[in-house]
Structure formats: C-alpha cells, structure tokens
C-alpha cells in the first residue's frame, strides 16, 4: 500500500467517529435554524364604538414578515396568524392613527414578527346615522 492509503486507513475507527460527530453536530445546528416568510394576513377590527362607523374601508389584509424555526412552519394553519386591532378606548375623534406592532399579530408560539406593512392604520370615523342622512 502506498503512503496515502496507509494514512487513510490508520485509525479508521477514530476517523469514522469524527465524521459521525460532525454529522450529528451539523444536524443539531440545522434544527435550530430559522426561516423567514412573508404572509398576507387578515385584518380584524374589534369593538367598534357604538354610533360610529368607518368612513372608508381599511385594508382587508396586512403583510407580515415572520421568522420561525423550520419545524414550526409546516404546522402553521391559515387562520393561526391574524392582525387584530381592538378599538376599545382608541377612537377619540374623527381621525385615528394606530401603529401596528407585534402585539397586534396573533400567532403560534415560536413565531416571531419581524415587520408589518403597513406599519400603521389611518382610520376615519363618522357617526352611524350620518351616511344614511346623506342618501
């Protein structure tokens, strides 16, 4: 046998163990990696003040950029991520601007919100009877 072959076969058990440890370490690190994805999620406005209505319809969806471990992504259900804005005590005038934060995004555990577009809602309200009077 030549020198390379002898070097390759010498202590082959330790070399095989080293390769096995390297593969196991790679698999462990790979399992911790996260993926980013962008979803268009429904926007829900809750607790609309009585005697008011929206003068203009807000967007039906918002775009949310998310980060999650690769093993969490397949378990995401279509309705498991939503943008929910509670209007309780938020409407103080005709025009209201609400910054959208990760607190407004309902999501499963292990999913992180990176960004929301639009980053704020500009809502315009009018009295509920006003539109009917203009008809």
Image (cartoon, helix red, strand yellow):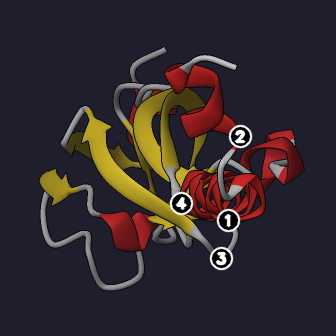
- Which comes before the other along the chain, label 2 or label 4? 2
Q: CA distance from mark 2 to mark 4?
A: 29 Å
- Residue 75 image point, x, y percent: 87, 52
| Vertical relation: 115 (above or below) 100 | above
Q: Is residue 71 visible?
A: yes
Residue at horizontal 27 percent and vertical 63 percent from the top? 101
- Is 130 or 92 nearer to us in this picture? 92
Q: CA distance from mark 1 to mark 2?
A: 10 Å
Image marks 2 and 3: residues in contact by CB distance under 8 Å? no
- Residue 65 image point, x, y percent: 40, 37
- Residue 35 image point, x, y percent: 51, 40
Which mark is in front, 4 or 3? 4
Badge 1 marks a residue whose secondary structure is: helix
- Is 47 or 107 nearer to us in this picture? 107
Q: Which residue is mark 4?
A: 29
Badge 2 marks a residue whose secondary structure is: helix
Residue at horizontal 83 percent and vertical 39 percent from the top? 78
Give the total number of marks visible in the rendering. Answer: 4
């Amino acid at each position: 046998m030549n020198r390379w072959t002898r070097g390759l076969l010498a202590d082959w058990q330790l070399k095989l163990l080293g390769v096995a440890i390297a593969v196991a370490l790679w698999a462990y690190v790979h399992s911790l990696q996260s993926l980013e994805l962008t979803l268009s999620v429904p926007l829900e406005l809750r607790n609309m003040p009585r005697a008011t209505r929206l003068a203009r319809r807000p967007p039906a969806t918002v775009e949310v950029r998310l980060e999650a471990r690769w093993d969490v992504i397949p378990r995401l259900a279509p309705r498991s991520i939503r943008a929910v804005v509670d209007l309780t005590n938020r409407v103080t005038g005709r025009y209201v601007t609400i910054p959208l934060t990760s607190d407004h995004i309902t999501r499963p555990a292990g999913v992180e919100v990176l960004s929301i577009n639009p980053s704020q809602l500009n809502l315009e309200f009018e009295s509920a009877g006003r539109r009917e009077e203009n008809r």
